[in-house]
Amino acid sequence: MKIITSVAFATLTLSASSLIDTAKKAGLEPIPNSKTELMKLIDNPKNPLTDAKVQLGKKLYFDPRLSKSGIISCNTCHNLGEGGDDGVSAAIGHKWTANPHHLNSPTVYNAVFFDAQFWDGRDPDLEKQAQGPIQAHPEMAATKEHVEATINSIPSYIAEFKNAYGSDVKISFEKITDTIATFERILVTPSPYDSFLHGNENALNQAQKDGLKTFMNKGCATCHTGISLGQSMNAMNVTATYKYQNVGDFKGDANGMVKVPTLRNITQTAPYFHNGQIWSLKEAIIEMGRIQLGSSITDKEASSIETFLKVLNGKKPVLTMPILPASTERTPRPDMN
Amino acid sequence: MKIITSVAFATLTLSASSLIDTAKKAGLEPIPNSKTELMKLIDNPKNPLTDAKVQLGKKLYFDPRLSKSGIISCNTCHNLGEGGDDGVSAAIGHKWTANPHHLNSPTVYNAVFFDAQFWDGRDPDLEKQAQGPIQAHPEMAATKEHVEATINSIPSYIAEFKNAYGSDVKISFEKITDTIATFERILVTPSPYDSFLHGNENALNQAQKDGLKTFMNKGCATCHTGISLGQSMNAMNVTATYKYQNVGDFKGDANGMVKVPTLRNITQTAPYFHNGQIWSLKEAIIEMGRIQLGSSITDKEASSIETFLKVLNGKKPVLTMPILPASTERTPRPDMN
């Protein structure tokens, strides 16, 4: 029944292996299987990955003392136990302030695959990105000086920085955010979809393969492409007369370009869109067709695409919860105001 | 030098083994070495510990969707990466509201060793305690109905409850909080001090042993006793003319009794006192002597006691970060108001 239904609206009817070829021609790429290849892809030559940096970066990622209040960490809005985000429509930060443009927190999982960070793509990599929310007033609301003073007041953090960077390291704000970025770089989530693109034809069942076809046929892969099934920047019809256009004042970058978010783990990252106004994945699929592709996606087609998108739920790295070193009397105190 | 100094003010000069005897006579007790004995102590016959419950309880403990806003979990104020608390003077909850009585979040580590929970001791165990903050308006601000609807909207949570309690389980608010409590029951942190009380005379060095003597000689162990080095309830001079008496309106229970907090991991749980007004451990020690014992503790004595207290830093359970199941379209949406 499922197969008949999907064939009815699929313009492509392909064998599994030619479906893989078609997907690759459409620009879809798997997360590399080989650890060496993956490392090449996620590493930053200017800030090379090492175990020591990643372990330290993990602590910093979970440390709320980097915020002005002492109670907001990177993980507050990019919760690794959830979809790498916060599950609310607009990020809530210091003093319970919502993002002033009503922007939704993007997932940190697989963010390494983007060449531009933030919805307006203003930062080129995770190293630079990590500097933003820590200092943004409606987010962690800290100053560089607060962050530096905090870390430098805690002897075991100093020891870990020395271990990671050498004993003459200067623990600057940038060194701290670079270290957070190394941890974020390992947050990739390979899925059955990747296995399929690597040639394992049985990694997807027929309904999922049909979903992938529908996804491509309807044009979704034009923007949701590459390893991330997203794209650094693309035109988005943010001013379209769409249902939720009036929530938030975000208009993209100077050229009206908007980052196309990853679709990996998409079932875990509702609500959707830059302003987090759509809670139903199927509704999001249909709305995207209407405002971005100018084509109507039927309920059946949306279901088929949704079936495919579920295959993008990947295996998250198993993380031991970091035990943070204790504050000292020199550690700046929390400031709730 | 250290030894001479401490002998000068120690009224007891004991061998290690007689120090152990004296400590035990003073009511100090180690966390049991044997797993069977420990299990007997931390288990609740009305809500017996099982692996399935503990694993599920861990997820619930970290799940911010139990709160009205969707962004506050048990771990927000009782952060297991920190000292099992939040490091701020008064707990901050829903809508950035501080605890109305300016009460400091107690640590969840070793909370199982208390017969009364909360600063006013109003709840007898962790099962009952867990019901409080979830519903308290300045904390997680949820209703029972919200919590039940949330968990019952997520198929894999339902499956885990069935696995833990049997297929006919009714996933009520109380069942959910009972499950959280089972996880909290395993959060115990044995330390070198326990090893010492178990007879390993070399687990403490001479300065630490001297510190323990000073701790007992000054009378600290009168209230800070038992396994927790705390006590379920005791008189506290909350109305004493002490430096910070005017911060918060907390007056203890109906009889003016206050829970004596654990001293385990105390260097990680600043700020101190029920109203979180003292940031320096040494200052807290001296102030306690003045307002509770009516005796002056010298700077040297306070340093010696502090040296002992550092030995109470225990080994925390190694926890794998839970991956929470995704929300569904039936999951209640976050409400920031």
Image (cartoon, coloured by chain):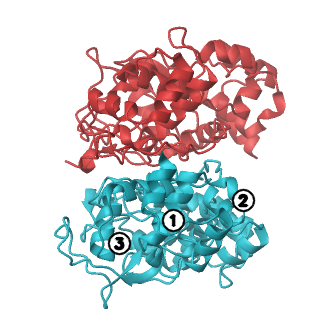
Chain colours: A cyan, B red
How many badges with numbers are in the image?
3
* Helix, strand or loop at mark 1: helix
Amino acid type for the residue under numbered disc 1: Lys
> Against B44, is A227 above or below?
below
| Circle 3 residue | A136
x and y percentages locating residue A92 in the rendered image: 31, 58
| Residue B224 showing in the rendered view | no
CB-based contact (under 8 Å), mark 2 and mark 3: no
Query: Is B337 situated left or right of A209 in this image?
Result: left
Quarter-of-image position of residue B241: top left
The image shows residue A123, relative to residue A312, as above or below, that is below
Same chain assignment for discs 2 and 3 = yes
Residue B162 as seen in the image, left or right of residue A197: left
Q: Earlier in the sequence, mark 2 or mark 3?
A: 3
Q: Which residue is mark 1?
A: A213
Q: Which residue is mark 2?
A: A200
| Mark 3: amino acid | Ala
Task: Report the Cα–Cα distance between label 1 and label 2.
Answer: 17 Å
Task: Looking at the image, tell me whether mark 1 or mark 3 is earlier in sequence order.
Answer: 3
Is B111 rendered above or below residue B4? above
Discs 1 and 3 share one subunit: yes
Element marked by disc 3: loop
Amino acid type indicated by mark 2? Asn
Instruction: Look at 26% across and 37% down and name the residue there.
Output: B141
Q: Position of residue B99 (x, y in %)?
A: 27, 40
Disc 3 crowd rating (10 Å Cα; few below 14, some 14-19, many 20+) is some
